Structure formats: C-alpha cells, structure tokens
Image (cartoon, rainbow, N blue to C red):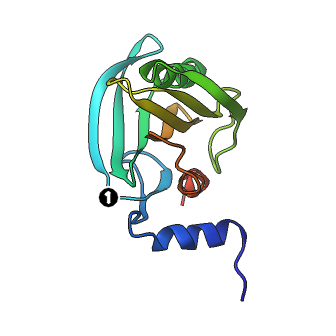
Amino acid sequence: MALGGPIAVGLLMGCSPALDWREVRPEGTAVVAMLPCKPSASSRTVQLAGYPVRLSMLACKADGTTWALAAADVAEPGRVGAALEALRESTRANLQGQVIEAAAVAVRGATPHAAQVRVRVGGRKQDGSPASAQFIVFSHGTQVFQAIAMGSRWPEPAAETFFESLRVGS
C-alpha cells in the first residue's frame, strides 16, 4: 500500500527519533496543536498593541528547532487585529530580520480575520548567528495565538506537520 500526502508526512515525522509528536492544548483555550517534543509552560504579562495582557506559552526544543504556541486574551474584539500585527512584528524585530514570505492563512475553527497570516522571517539570533522562523498568527474570539518554529534552518517538513495540526475545538 502506497502512502502519500500529509498522512505519510505525519507518519514519517512520528517515527523520527528526534521528534516525539504529542497533542497539546494551552490552558484556558480551545486551540489544539501537535508539538514534536514535551513542552514546558510559562506565562508573563507583556504589552501587546499598547495593552497589558497575560501571554502564556507552551514551548520545547527538538532537532535544533524551538517550537512554541503562545496565547493571550486581548479582552475586546476591536483589539484583535492590532494584537495579531504586534505578534507578527515582534517576531521579525526579535530576529532583526526581514519577512521573506507572508500569506493569508485559515486555521481550522479559528475566527476569520484579515490579519491572520503565515510568515517566514530570516534574520539573526542575539549572538549574531543566522536564524529563521516560520509562524502563524490567528485568533479565536478575543484570544490571539502565535504558533512558531524557529531555528538556524527551515524545519521542513516537520513545520508542515506542526502548522497543519493547528485547530480550534475538539
């Protein structure tokens, strides 16, 4: 029997010794994702689009890539677009980089919004070494999310498995 498409990629990634895929759901959200390693949880208050919000993150490192899913509730629907733009810009600025590619994206079950996008950024880490990131910013109600894969190279095809796993709801 021949395997093809996303199912084959998912099965192959699941067999990789460096990647141990597991389903995660950030506390207090309806978002589900597959991460290739056991994440640690953290949270802190940050300024996002001019407002203080509690940003929670599940993150881990596997195969030379940091994988993370961040979530924040911006409390008012009118703040969602600016918050998504702020998440996007902060990642570009943190890498002192440039956007290589940006395209509209639809995450299953997410609230549709014009600022939801998948982005590739090339830049540098704090130590000056090359870095690249792929990420998606999206929302559900007043909650905003960023799913990111960041490392010294593009983590293909594992990034596809990660991003395709994103969904809101069961």
Which class describes the residues within 10 Å of circle 1: few (<14), some (14-19), or many (20+)? some
Q: Residue at x 34, y 20 (%)?
A: 46
Quarter of the image that includes the C terminus: bottom right
Q: Residue at x 61, y 55 (%)?
A: 164
Nearer the observer, 33 or 142: 33
Residue 71, by quadrant, is: top left
Q: Is residue 151 above or below residue 125?
A: below
Lateral position of residue 112 relative to residue 61, left or right: right
Q: Which residue is mark 1?
A: 38
Q: Secondary structure at mark 1?
A: loop
Residue 152, by quadrant, is: top left
Quarter of the image that includes the N terminus: bottom right
Point out the residue furthest to the top here: 50
Lateral position of residue 82 relative to residue 43, left or right: right
Number of numbered markers? 1
Q: Position of residue 17 (x, y in %)?
A: 39, 70
Point out the residue furthest to the bottom here: 1
Q: Position of residue 169 (x, y in %)?
A: 55, 55
Question: Type of residue at label 1?
Answer: Lys
Q: Residue at x 54, y 44 (%)?
A: 154
Q: Position of residue 112 (x, y in %)?
A: 69, 36
Nearer the observer, 101 or 111: 101
